[in-house]
Image (cartoon, rainbow, N blue to C red):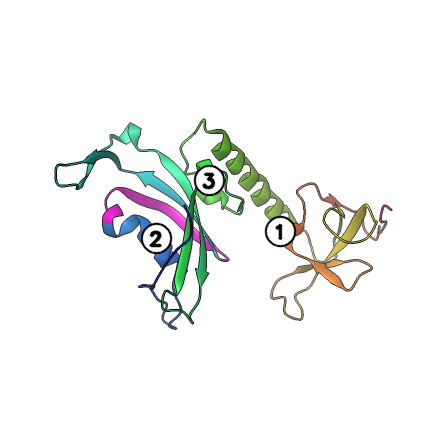
Amino acid sequence: MGWISYRATHYTKTGQVDKKAECDARFEEGVAEGNCCILKSRMIGNTYYAAIKQLKAYKGEDENGKSIYEDLTIPEQEVYAVVILTSVDNNEYCNFAYKLIDETMGPFETKCPISILTLLTPTNNKYALEWRERCSKNANKEKKLKALSVGTKIRISNRGRKGDKQTIVLQKMQPAYSFKTPWWKVMGENAYCNYSDIPIDFEVLPDNKYEIHV
């Protein structure tokens, strides 16, 4: 499914497009109303994650071209995950755009909360299973990183960064500058590292240990 743009109908009290409400509406309003329900949804940045329970199954069209849906029994009501990419451009009349991705498509975005993953029905789909595993590992990484105290140093591989060093060392810093939460400084450089760029296999260094493999 490609990107779809239209004029938003859901806004916050401050007049901003309510991205979560717009995404929720894909499953709660219009032709989708009553066919499924949202068990839990959350916006992380510009990406929407949700656990969707399918309540009815599409059975085709009647003689007038109207879609026919049939109620599913409780055992048939599967819960699956969806990811929706969003974009807002207030300079355009069609100020909201989204792209819906089913978990069976193996989305690149893997910050789905554990609270949503635990609601999903078991599946045999290879791509969905791989995506769920990546999300679980990423969530566990975030939990471990947030639990580390300020001042902690970790070593990570130098994949994707400039220079010939095999590894780099990061130190967790107090909120400062434009950072409202603790952030990771690249030791020996005037640079920082995003949480999302820290690999799962990071190594916590003992106190005051600061070696970089070259």
Residue under the point 81% across and 51% down:
207
Q: Quadrant of the N terminus?
A: top left
Q: Give the x, y percent position of residue 78.
A: 34, 33
Question: Disc 2 marks which amino acid?
Answer: Asp
As drawn, the label of residue 196 is 1
**Distance (Cα) linking label 1 and label 2:** 25 Å
Question: Disc 3 marks which amino acid?
Answer: Leu
Looking at the rendering, the stretch of residues picked out in magenta corresponds to 31-45
Local SS, label 1: helix
Query: Which residue in the structure is indicated by mark 2?
Result: 24
**Mark before the other along the chain sequence, 1 or 3:** 3
Q: Quadrant of residue 34?
A: top left
As drawn, the label of residue 117 is 3
Q: Nearer the viewer, residue 130 or 173?
A: 130
| Outermost residue to the left | 63
**Distance (Cα) linking label 1 and label 3:** 19 Å
Residue 210 vs residue 191: left or right? right
Q: Give the x, y percent position of residue 101.
A: 43, 44
Dominant secondary structure of the residues highlighted in magenta in the image: strand
As drawn, the label of residue 130 is none
